[in-house]
Image (tube, helix red, strand yellow):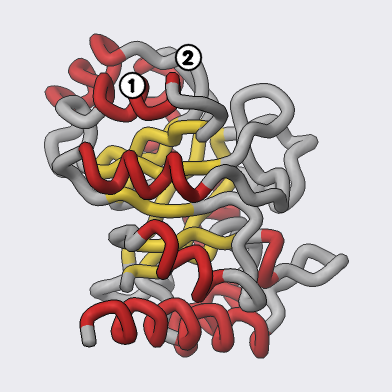
Amino acid sequence: MRVKICGIRSATDAALCVRAGASALGFLCGVPPSVPCYISPSEAREIIGIVPPYVSTVLVTTLSQPQEIEELLRQVPASTLQFHGAISPDHVADLRVSKPYLKLIRTIQVISRDSVAEARLWESHVDALLLDSKGEGDLGGTGRTHDWNLSREIVQVVTIPVILAGGLKPDNVQRAVRATEPFGVDVNSGVTDPLLRKNPQKVAEFIKLAREAELEGKQ
């Protein structure tokens, strides 16, 4: 079970998530500064520089124009791009050409059965899908769960990895994993304290419980 801890804002938080066994770290610097856990591109670049091998770094953005995204990637050398919003498949194809090393994750807001069709549309254009709850504007980060039955259907009908997000926390991650059987899970607010720092106990517990639930499903 791959686990991404999103909303990394400091080297301290990055280090504690790595020690706890995180597969990936997410950086919210391609979003409006008003978004909680936003950090600047220069801050993200500095943290990414100390992330060890075998831990993915994920740049999260709501930008929709390839030129804007490429400029941000020049500043933030992440291994993966997770994009929300109105970017088109054609623009994603342009990024494939200009950044062939970059892994691409498309966020799908799970709202209705239309979300299943949207997932099918995107599966041939990206390396993975991330399923989130509907939030204000294009970004998720609501702290609320969505219909896991729809998420499970998406997992079953697409051929690429699916990552589950949206309101996950130590208290519900095992139920979420059992209900959807995703490739991975993604958490931010569920392991973050009021000062926007990662809680070491919650991070460790979340990762442990997510992986235990996956192992139970394989027995």
Mark 1 vs mark 2, CA separation in Å: 16 Å
Say if residue 48 shows up in the picture: no
Residue 198 vs residue 160: left or right? right
Q: Which element is circle 2 on?
A: loop
Instruction: Report the residue at 60% width, 44% height from top.
Output: 146
Instruction: Report the residue at 13% width, 35% height from top.
Output: 100
- Mark closer to the chain start, 1 or 2: 2
Q: Amino acid at mark 2?
A: Ala
Instruction: Report the residue at 35% width, 12% height from top.
Output: 88
Which circle, 1 or 2, is nearer the viewer? 1
CB of mark 1 within 8 Å of CB of mark 2? no
Residue 135 at what x, y percent from top left?
69, 33
Q: Which element is circle 1 on?
A: helix
Q: Amino acid at mark 1?
A: Ala
Instruction: Report the residue at 63% width, 33% height from top.
Output: 134
Q: Residues within 10 Å of mark 2 (few under 14, many from 20)?
A: few
Which of the image's four quarters has the C terminus?
bottom left
Q: Residues within 10 Å of mark 1 (few under 14, many from 20)?
A: few
| Residue where numbered disc 2 is placed | 86
| Residue where numbered disc 1 is placed | 117
Asked if 83 appears above or below 153 in the picture, the reply is above
